[in-house]
């Protein structure tokens, strides 16, 4: 299982990926424009479980070149689930 989180506002009530291992997520990608947003989300995620499988990808979804670059990074994944 591979999950992707996007957006600049992180809501732990709805946006928490499989950090407890129930769904056996191999990787969790966090896409955001600003690294500080990713850092804030990572700090919040640490409250809910192991974040060693979480990886940040720089991506402004309003910028087609950045979106294309992020998509190419994710293209190597066998399957993306959420």
Image (cartoon, rainbow, N blue to C red):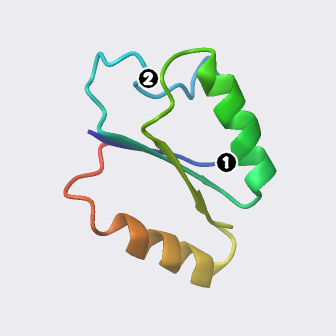
In the displayed structure, would residue 82 be above or below residue 35?
Answer: above
The answer to whether residue 9 is seen in the rendering is no
Helix, strand or loop status at disc 2: loop
Q: Quadrant of the N terminus?
A: top left
The residue drawn where x is 68% and y is 67% is 60
- Dot 1 or dot 2: first in sequence order is 1
Q: Quadrant of residue 71?
A: bottom left
Residue 34 in picture, x, y percent from top left: 77, 58
Question: Do we see residue 24 in this rendering?
Answer: yes
Residue at 27 percent of width and 67 percent of height? 76
* Crowding at mark 2 (Cα within 10 Å: few <14, some 14-19, many 20+): many
Q: Nearer the viewer, residue 70 or 82?
A: 70
Residue extending furthest toward the left: 78
What residue is disc 1 on? 7
Q: Residue at x 67, y 48 (%)?
A: 7
The image quadrant of residue 14 is: top right
Instruction: Establish if 66 lies above or below 39.
Output: below
Q: Secondary structure at mark 1?
A: loop
Q: Residue at x 60, y 77 (%)?
A: 66
Q: Which residue is mark 2?
A: 19
Give the label, 1 or 2, closer to the camera: 2
Q: Position of residue 55 (x, y in %)?
A: 51, 49
Q: Measuring from the top left, give residue 16's x and y in whole percent.
A: 53, 25
| Observer-nearest of 67 and 37 | 37
């Amino acid at each position: 299982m591979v999950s992707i989180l996007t957006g600049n506002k992180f809501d732990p009530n709805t946006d928490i990926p499989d950090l407890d291992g129930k769904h056996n997520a191999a990787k969790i990608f966090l896409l955001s424009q600003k690294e500080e947003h990713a850092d804030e989300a990572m700090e919040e995620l640490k409250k809910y479980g192991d974040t060693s499988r979480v990886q940040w990808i720089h991506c402004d979804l309003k910028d087609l070149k950045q979106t294309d670059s992020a998509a190419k990074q994710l293209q190597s994944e066998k399957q993306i689930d959420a």
